[in-house]
């Protein structure tokens, strides 16, 4: 009996920490999403508004749909490019792959940088006056010199995608290397004995067996791309205009700058909807792999 009580006593501090840092903020944000929630209006945090914040975001706020579009395109591009490039690097770095030691050394650098630092670094590198890329293009491609990359909506968006891909490639590459190592060598050798070339071996043998790992990588990267904030904030701050304003930045902008806490909380909960489906798919894939 004493042991049964002791285990609950030992786990209680951890439960309290999780409740204080995760569960309670979720409950409070859900409550605030149904209130007026204006920081400049006393008592508005307790003034019940119903579903009006949600209706305002979905039906009457073009900026919300702009941020949804930006987030969707940003997620699609970053997930696609990062997965393809990481898979290519994983093939090079897998046992027997070419250029293994050189590329593996380069993969260390992005791990040492936070997303905010990556955003600041890319902002300075694309500066039209003293940026690294401006000097590079000025020497090799003069027509692209003195281009205000972060002042053009399309170019600024491309820079944001580039920064995210650069920062995430190392992690996804290492995950995919683990998946490639798990592919049975006997299967690959049998395909080669049957006369299959390198491309057919990859397409018909390696890729199907790597599919579960690829699915996990894609879902995990999608979750992080959907909620990206600090890198965008430091790189473009959502600009120019709202060209790079993701949902997370839109939530911050309304909640912190305009003080519309209730509206920001409702948008945050709208963003939770795709997160739930992606998290469920991720957990299902991971648990399925553990059972097998």
Image (spheres, grey):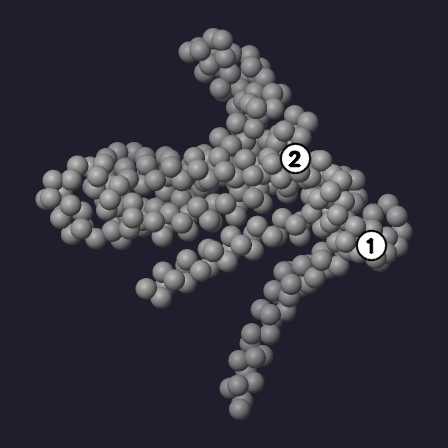
Residue on which the image places disc 2 = 66
- Residue sitting at the far top: 142
Question: Quick check: 144 above or below 290?
Answer: above
Residue at x 79% of width, y 44% of height: 259
Question: Quick check: 220 above or below 90?
Answer: below
At numbered mark 2, what does the secondary structure look like: helix, strand or loop? helix
Dot placed on the residue nearer the N-terminal end, 1 or 2 = 1
- Give the image quarter of residue 260: top right
Please provide percent x and percent y for residue 117: 55, 36
Q: Is residue 178 left or right of residue 194?
A: right
Q: Is residue 45 left or right of residue 220?
A: right
Q: CA distance from mark 1 to mark 2?
A: 25 Å
- Residue sitting at the far right: 42
Q: Is residue 24 visible?
A: yes
Please provide percent x and percent y for residue 9: 58, 79
Please provide percent x and percent y for residue 45: 83, 54
Few, some or many C-alpha atoms within 10 Å of disc 1 (few <14, some 14-19, many ≥20)? some
Residue at x 83% of width, y 51% of height: 36
Q: Is residue 280 left or right of residue 237?
A: left
Few, some or many C-alpha atoms within 10 Å of disc 2 (few <14, some 14-19, many ≥20)? some
Question: Quick check: 166 above or below 181?
Answer: above
Q: Is residue 163 visible?
A: no
Picture disc at residue 49: 1
Mark 1 and 2 residues: CB-CB less than 8 Å, in contact?
no
Towards the viewer: 11 or 245? 245
Residue at x 56% of width, y 79% of height: 8
- Give the image quarter of residue 64: top right
């Amino acid at each position: 009996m004493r042991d049964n009580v002791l285990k609950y006593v030992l786990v209680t501090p951890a439960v309290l920490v999780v409740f204080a840092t995760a569960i309670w903020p979720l409950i409070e944000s859900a409550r605030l999403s149904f209130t007026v929630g204006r920081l400049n209006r006393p008592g508005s945090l307790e003034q019940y508004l119903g579903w009006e914040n949600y209706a305002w975001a979905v039906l009457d706020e073009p900026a919300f749909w702009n941020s949804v579009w930006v987030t969707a395109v940003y997620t699609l591009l970053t997930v696609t490019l990062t997965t393809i490039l990481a898979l290519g690097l994983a093939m090079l770095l897998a046992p027997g792959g070419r250029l293994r030691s050189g590329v593996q050394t380069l993969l260390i650098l992005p791990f040492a940088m936070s997303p905010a630092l990556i955003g600041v670094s890319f902002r300075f590198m694309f500066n039209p006056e003293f940026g690294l890329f401006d000097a590079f293009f000025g020497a090799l491609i003069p027509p692209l010199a003195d281009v205000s990359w972060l002042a053009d909506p399309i170019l600024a968006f491309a820079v944001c995608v580039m920064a995210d891909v650069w920062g995430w490639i190392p992690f996804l590459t290492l995950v995919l290397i683990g998946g490639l190592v798990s592919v049975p060598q006997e299967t690959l050798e049998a395909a080669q004995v049957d006369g299959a070339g390198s491309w057919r071996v990859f397409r018909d043998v390696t890729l199907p067996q790597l599919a579960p790992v690829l699915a996990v990588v894609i879902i995990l990267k999608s979750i992080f791309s959907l909620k990206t904030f600090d890198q965008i904030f430091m790189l473009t701050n959502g600009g120019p205009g709202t060209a790079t304003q993701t949902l997370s930045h839109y939530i911050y902008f309304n909640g912190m700058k305009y003080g519309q806490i209730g509206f920001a909380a409702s948008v945050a909960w709208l963003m939770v909807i795709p997160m739930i489906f992606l998290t469920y798919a991720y957990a299902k894939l991971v648990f399925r792999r553990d059972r097998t």
